[in-house]
Image: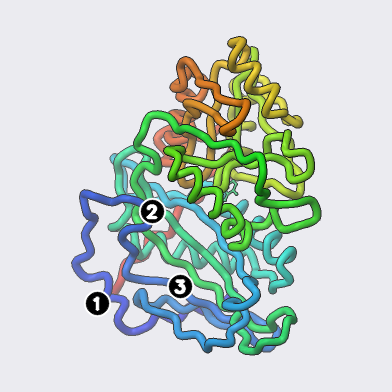
């Protein structure tokens, strides 16, 4: 296990931190961060530092070739205890390494990843809100830190973890979704399954256009036929059709969401059938019109579960869900939130990770 170096100034940085009433998302950062460097073929010590700027040479590879990956996870604290919990962090560690492999980056030992998120959650515990739906958002990321303009995989990497108190992601009751029929986010054989910045950069042009037209989110279709639903720019998709849950089956162009997987497992545990299959947008629009599809929702760590109110591609499709805040999505959301903040026992024993209780001397 990597040694931990606690930098001077941590105590000072953490002194008097208080949680603002107006938390937002990614608005206030924890005053501390984790950094760990990979050089000469190995990971060095885990450093806990005051939050600070990172200095990079203008020729650092990440700035030119986008060799970078990230994760998103949350630490929860419930109203009744001082304990802090992470939700399935080992899944984030595994996905981080899947992304690293796809991007030609160094693997990170799962123990190093888990120790780092445990440390930042524990030291930042005062910044973890207690109201339901609020948490500390944790952002681990890794960049190619070797200097040089040659297009070759970096031999040096920097792993950093920052954290930020997070309110509910969407306060609006439901979201209006723009269905993109032209541009693509990810193509077969590409990097869609990896959590790497380039996928998000590829989505931003459509995001600009959809926000201008009053939509909250973009739905991506398969790159080849522009017919089958894949996912949102940062969330997976579900629909309730004939009383069953349906979600696009995973391909190499879809991020394997941990919330998605948890919803499938939770639904099945509660006796609700869940079908993973190709879903055509035209078929879904028809099912919404004829009342077979009663609910649709998006899900992810940041948003948990948010109902879809309408879908439009600006051409042939323009459908509204009659009752977006349906019983199935709100029930799943309630269950998931209670499990994540340990207000309800998880039916799956390995879902909840109790964060270490570290006191600063
Ligand atoms: C593209 C994309 N799809 C889906 C998700 C949902 O994944 P998770 O539930 O693991 O947060 C995310 C967020 O991480 C994402 O960025």
Residue 136's tag is 2
Residue 256 to residue 34: above or below:
above
Residue at 42% across / 76% down in the picture?
A: 48
Question: How packed is label 1: few (under 14 Cα within 10 Å), some, or many (20 or more)?
Answer: few
Residue at 53% across / 87% down in the picture?
A: 58
Q: Is mark 1 on a helix, strand or loop?
A: helix
Residue at 24% across / 77% down in the picture?
A: 12
Give the CA separation, mark 1 to mark 2.
Answer: 21 Å
Q: Quadrant of residue 158?
A: bottom right
Q: Name the residue under label 1.
A: 12
Q: In which quarter of the image is residue 52?
A: bottom left
Earlier in the chain: of badge 3 and badge 1, it is 1
User: Nearest the camera: 360 or 25?
Assistant: 25
Q: How many marks?
A: 3
Name, please, the residue furthest toward the front. Answer: 315
Q: Mark 3 points at which residue?
A: 34
Earlier in the chain: of badge 3 and badge 2, it is 3
Q: Where is residue 229 in the image (x, y as percent from the top left)?
A: 68, 35
Residue 213's tag is none
Give the CA separation, mark 3 to mark 2.
Answer: 15 Å
């Amino acid at each position: 296990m990597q040694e931990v170096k606690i930098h001077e100034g941590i105590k000072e940085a953490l002194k008097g931190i208080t949680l603002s009433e107006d938390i937002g998302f990614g608005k206030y950062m924890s005053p501390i961060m984790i950094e760990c460097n990979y050089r000469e073929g190995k990971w060095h010590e885990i450093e806990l530092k005051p939050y600070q700027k990172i200095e990079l040479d203008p020729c650092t590879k990440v700035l030119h070739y986008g060799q970078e990956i990230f994760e998103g996870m949350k630490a929860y604290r419930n109203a009744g205890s001082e304990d802090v919990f992470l939700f399935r962090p080992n899944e984030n560690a595994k996905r981080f390494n899947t992304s690293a492999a796809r991007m030609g980056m160094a693997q990170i030992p799962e123990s190093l990843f888990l120790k780092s998120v445990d440390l930042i959650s524990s030291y930042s515990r005062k910044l973890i809100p207690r109201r339901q739906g609020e948490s500390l958002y944790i952002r681990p990321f890794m960049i190619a830190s070797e200097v040089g303009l040659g297009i070759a995989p970096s031999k040096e990497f920097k792993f950093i973890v920052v954290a930020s108190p997070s309110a509910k992601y969407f306060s609006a009751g439901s979201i209006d979704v723009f269905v993109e029929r032209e541009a693509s986010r990810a193509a077969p054989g590409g990097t869609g399954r990896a959590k790497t910045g380039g996928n998000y950069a590829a989505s931003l042009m459509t995001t600009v256009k959809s926000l201008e037209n009053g939509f909250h989110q973009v739905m991506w279709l398969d790159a080849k036929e522009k017919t089958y639903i894949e996912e949102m720019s940062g969330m997976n998709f579900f629909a309730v059709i004939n009383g069953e849950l349906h979600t696009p089956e995973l391909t190499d162009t879809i991020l394997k969401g941990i919330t998605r997987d948890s919803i499938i497992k939770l639904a099945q545990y509660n006796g609700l059938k869940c079908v993973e299959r190709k879903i055509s947008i035209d078929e879904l629009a028809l099912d919404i019109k004829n009342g077979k599809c009663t609910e649709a929702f998006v899900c992810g760590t940041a948003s948990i579960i948010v109902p879809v109110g309408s879908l439009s591609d600006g051409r042939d499709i323009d459908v509204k869900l009659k009752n977006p805040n349906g019983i199935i999505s709100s029930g799943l959301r309630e269950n998931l939130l209670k499990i994540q903040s340990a207000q309800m026992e998880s039916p799956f024993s390995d879902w909840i990770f109790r964060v270490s209780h570290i006191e600063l001397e």
